[in-house]
Image: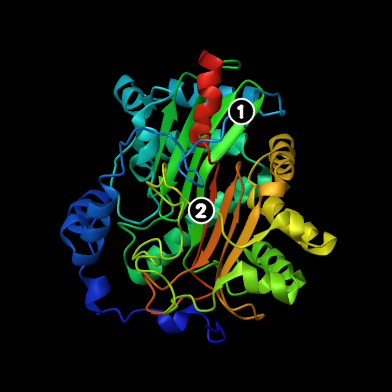
Amino acid sequence: MSDDAGFRRYLFPADDERIAGLRGLDAYSYREAAKHDGFTGELIRGWQPLYGAEFRGITSDGAIVPDLYSPSDDGAPVAAMTAAAEAALAGLDPDRRARLCYGIEAVEWQSWANPEFMQHDTGLRLEFLEPARRDDLLAIVEATLSPRGYDLVRTLMSINGYLGGLTGLDGIMNEFSYNFALYGTPSLTEPWGWQLFGHHVALNCVVIGGQLVVSPVFFGAEPDKLRDEDAPAFAARIAHARALVAALTPEQRATAVLFDEMVDPAMPEGRVHPGDERHLAGAFQDNRVIPYEGVRASELSAEALGHLLALVADFVDYLPSGPAEARVREVEAHLGDTWFSWIGGTGPGDVFYLRVQSPVVILELDHHCGVFLSNTEPAPFHIHTIVRTPNGNDYARALVRQHRG
């Protein structure tokens, strides 16, 4: 689908029932309304049985691969993170502090979601905090991520507010319509972490001494930029993906491309989910079995492999330099069992879905239909991306359990 006319041609009319019926709602009233809507209600009912299931981790065949993760010092900014978290806690009254904090292995980790409707009111809602307290919590995020990563988070949050303003739905979509929670006790040595989630942004972060795990991660945008002159939020990622698929041999491309169309008649029933579309590793999919598909990385040319590793590096550049380099090395150690797959066209303007999957990482990118824009086909200006750490180390669970012995 071409973006020649830009996303604005897909804005709903101000009096459209899809939009007008939601005006005046806030996060809590919309939460209740969403349960009774035909579309969102069905999504919620489908996800409910998955939330709270005992965590095992995503696998390729139902069996956890053992001994993949081990403690290390990757240069995580633990001192800055801990100082920011302690300052944020000091600024909260006892009631808010109690609502913010959970145990390090609490089931609430698994409550994150990326839609605009709030399913779980985990922690504190940023939009209802005083600016100083909100800034304190966001300072923890800034202390954790790379400058580029934090800028991306704040850009996507701002785009959410921009969309809310364009549609007149700023009660349910605004720059701060996100939940934030702390897990464990901030420490230089013991495991602890934080969680931020809402529309198109979700991060789950655990630090254990010098080791940092930020996974699962969901980044998305509708539209994909704030101003016409801005580069799209995921321009580099799209460029690396197109370069990779272009570097495949015709035979490799035929193997990597699972389906030629984003909604393909050859797809099995259920392959396109009403909410996640082609994504397999989204919210509430913590224990999903996702078989390997596509072409194996070890079969790629040096050029194609270089593009694959550049794509991986772009996906994880929300991490500061030490942890990001460690994450790429972790992926490189498993290139013999890394798979690349694609759905959709491979031309320069085509929309697509991709997945990079190995024992230690799942990366997904998907172009979506409109939710608060009216396009009924996937478009370049609505994009979702996911990072997962399969075989039990989402939320750093494998490392936390090792630490506890």
| CB-based contact (under 8 Å), mark 2 and mark 1 | no
Q: Is residue 97 left or right of residue 403?
A: left
Q: Position of residue 232 (x, y in %)?
A: 61, 68
Q: Residue furthest left?
A: 36
Residue at disc 2, secondary structure: loop
Q: Position of residue 278 (x, y in %)?
A: 45, 64
Q: Residue furthest right?
A: 302
> Which residue is identified by label 1?
67
Identify residue type, mark 1.
Answer: Asp
Q: Position of residue 302 (x, y in %)?
A: 84, 60
Identify residue type, mark 2.
Answer: Pro
Residue count near mark 2 (Cα–Cα under 10 Å), binned few <14, some 14–19, many ≥20: few
**Residue 180: quadrant of the picture:** top left
Residue at disc 1, secondary structure: loop
Q: Residue at x 23, y 72 (%)?
A: 20
Q: Nearer the viewer, residue 11 or 39?
A: 39
Q: Nearer the viewer, residue 339 or 14?
A: 339
Q: Which mark is residue 291?
A: 2
Q: Earlier in the sequence, mark 2 or mark 1?
A: 1
Q: Is residue 222 left or right of residue 129?
A: right
Q: Nearer the viewer, residue 147 or 362?
A: 362
Residue 252 visible in the displayed image = yes
Q: Is residue 206 left or right of residue 28?
A: right
Instruction: Establish if 349 lies above or below 48.
Output: below
Instruction: Establish if 280 lies above or below 320.
Output: below
